[in-house]
Amino acid sequence: MADLYTTNALRLLQAADDLRVALTAEFSAVHGISVNEFLLMLHLERSAANRLSRVDLAKRMHVSASTITRMAAPMEKIGLVGREVDERDARLVFVVTTDAGREKLSEALATFTKRAGYMFSDRFDHEEMDQFASMLRRLIAGTGDTLA
């Protein structure tokens, strides 16, 4: 049984890598952003207040706060994200998506949706996709905030 778990975990990693490779090329060429920049903006847009501290964003993306700082700085320079200081505590700064960032995210999300369709539509019918979605939900249950 352990071999089956190992094999399936490796297949899951392979599928994720294949999707990331396809998205990386398309996001860069068409939208001028990376997959990680897309995910950063998606986490911001799907958060309760459409903003997150760098620490909370780092937790959601499973990276360090310094990685978020390094990612957000160039995005800030080109106007995709900005900073918002907490009204009650000026020491707390949030990362927020700008109007330009929201527009870029919307365009990239359409590309993502199209690419996901390519990945699944010719392999699985609707019932299989429902089963797959249920299994993925169980797999990530309890791991914290998710994007879906």
Image (cartoon, rainbow, N blue to C red):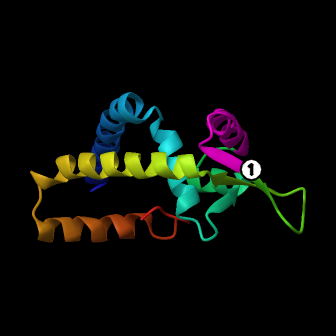
Residue at numbered disc 1 = 83
Answer above or below: position of 22 versus 115.
above
Question: Is 139 situated left or right of 4 in this image?
Answer: right
Q: Quadrant of the C terminus?
A: bottom left
Does the rendering let one see residue 38?
yes
**What's the residue at 71%, 40% (across, down)?**
69
Residue 9 visible in the shown view = no
Where disc 1 sits, the SS reads: strand
Asked whether residue 80 is drawn in magenta, I would say yes
With 85 as the anchor, is 136 left or right in this view? left
Residue that appears at 21% across and 71% down: 130
- Where are the magenta residues, as a range? 65-82
Question: Does 128 sit left or right of 24 as displayed?
Answer: left
Residue 98 drawn at (x, y percent): 61, 51
Which is more toward the observer, 123 or 8? 123
Which residue does the image show at 74% across and 50% down from the upper left?
Answer: 83
> In terms of secondary structure, what is the magenta stretch mainly?
helix
Residue 71 occupies quadrant: top right
The quadrant of the rendering that contains the N terminus is: bottom left
- Residue 121 part of the magenta-drawn span: no
Based on the displayed image, in which of its 4 quarters is residue 52 positioned?
A: bottom right
The answer to whether 64 is drawn above or below residue 21 in the figure is: below
